[in-house]
Image (cartoon, rainbow, N blue to C red):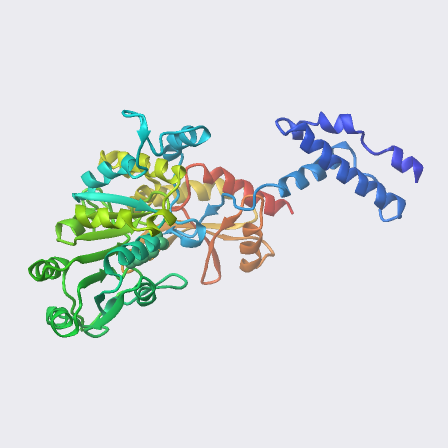
Amino acid sequence: MCNLLSGLPNMNSLLEHPLFTGVGTERVKQTAREVLDELRGDILTGKATTLPDLDECAELISARLNADANNLRGLINATGIVLHTNLGRSPLGTDMFAAAAEVCAGYCNLEYDLETGRRGSRYSHTEELIRKLTGAEAAMVVNNNAAAMVLILSALAAGKKVAISRGELVEIGGSFRIPEIIEHSGAKLVEIGSTNKTRLSDYIEAVNNHGAEVLLKVHTSNYEIIGFTESVSVPELAAYAKSAGLPLLYDMGSCYLTDPEQLGLPAGETARSGVAAGADVICFSGDKLMGSVQAGIIAGDEELIAKIKKHPLARAMRPDKLTLSVLETSLRLYKYPDEAAMRIPVLAMLRASPSELFSRSTALSNLLNDCLPNWSIEVCEIMDETGGGSLPNVRLPGWGVSLRAPEMSVNELEYKLRRGRIPVIIRIQDDKALISVRTLQPTDDARLIQALQDIAKQ
Ligand SMILES: *Cc1c(COP(=O)(O)O)cnc(C)c1O
């Protein structure tokens, strides 16, 4: 037993092991001590009868150091769902962070006017850019679009009756329900029309006979009513709101900041179209079709936006410098739409053509066939999705690779990929494990191959 104990690798040779280059000595030392103590204990109690050698010991320590890594971490989204809300919605690439890293590493002019040397406004960095991209008179940013809705309604509709179509009383992911948000904001809901049909006369009746003072339109982002339907378009409703002297608020949910047709993107509304249609205030998410950071963007009439900015809740929803910096960078990218289409990952993924995806799938499948000779690996057609409650009726024809490992069920493979060093989230369809290449980031292919090799080695 004592012989065994004296055979344990010593601390110095462990500290010098190549596995730990670049890792802080303090961390390695402390973790090594833990591991060595446990090994000693196992030897003394007879639980262990053989000793790990230096390399094996270093592996044990390294595994424990890795387990200390952050819980929130990157993974590979191979589902083909571009805006996957559970997987962080909009991937940002690396371009959008360069400025944020510098801004956030030190101090910054978040609320400081460099010209006057006095207090400035955190909204100032993005307001002009949003104004230009949407055509609105004024703008502000909050932490997400749900917050935007709560703030807009609290500032503009508290104590008032708000008319909204029954077809737009939606629930958006989890427990965000429009009717409840209206109530919480201190406004009173006036439901009009029916689930499938709402006419302009319904809005007029709500105003004339039920005292509605605010009109609300909500984009039914995550579902679509098909069949016998009728709804009032924003321009039509805006014309009426104007004639009645009432504000029209429009929650656009997910919208583009640039003309999708020009860039070969699936059809969808732009923020500019919402403003041009005559809505007095619009709001939308920063991390849906815009492809940026989580944020709620509010734009519209100058007086109304000023009122919203002054509301006490605005302080509780104000975005951090990290958000604002990434957002400003993305807004600046949109000045050059062709560049935005390439450098904003969500746009690049949405506009990837089937032939491009087919080539990528073929290349990936060839690589995988080379490293995993016993597996059954084939290129296959996959129907991808926009996700994130955006464009529910848009199908994105894509391509990918289907996998089958020898003597392993599809569910087992899915589990092992999910639990690997680099988690890979795949889709299971018709008892096949599918990897869609649309949502793979440029560096993902190599990591994916590594993850599959890890499983094959087990
Ligand atoms: C997604 C969505 C929201 C919520 O936006 P978050 O940015 O997720 O808070 C609100 N309204 C509509 C119509 C939406 O589609």
Q: Pinpoint residue 111: horizontal percent, then vertical percent.
A: 34, 34
Residue pictured at 21% horizontal, 61% vertical: 217
Residue pictured at 18% horizontal, 42% vertical: 262
In the rendered view, would you say 49 is above or below 6? below
In the rendered view, would you say 400 is above or below 445? below
Q: Which image quadrant shows ligand 1? A: bottom left
Residue pictured at 79% horizontal, 34% vertical: 53
Quadrant (top left/top right/bottom left/bottom right) for the N terminus: top right
Q: Pinpoint residue 153: horizontal percent, then vertical percent.
A: 27, 58
Foreground pick, 148 / 8: 148
Q: Pinpoint residue 420: horizontal percent, then vertical percent.
A: 58, 47
Q: Residue 36's image quarter?
A: top right
Q: Residue 128's image quarter?
A: top left
Q: Pinpoint residue 252: horizontal percent, then vertical percent.
A: 25, 55
Foreground pick, 422 / 360: 422
Q: Residue 114's image quarter?
A: top left
In this picture, residue 204 sits left or right of residue 430:
left
Which residue of the protein is positioned furthest toward the right in this rendering? 2
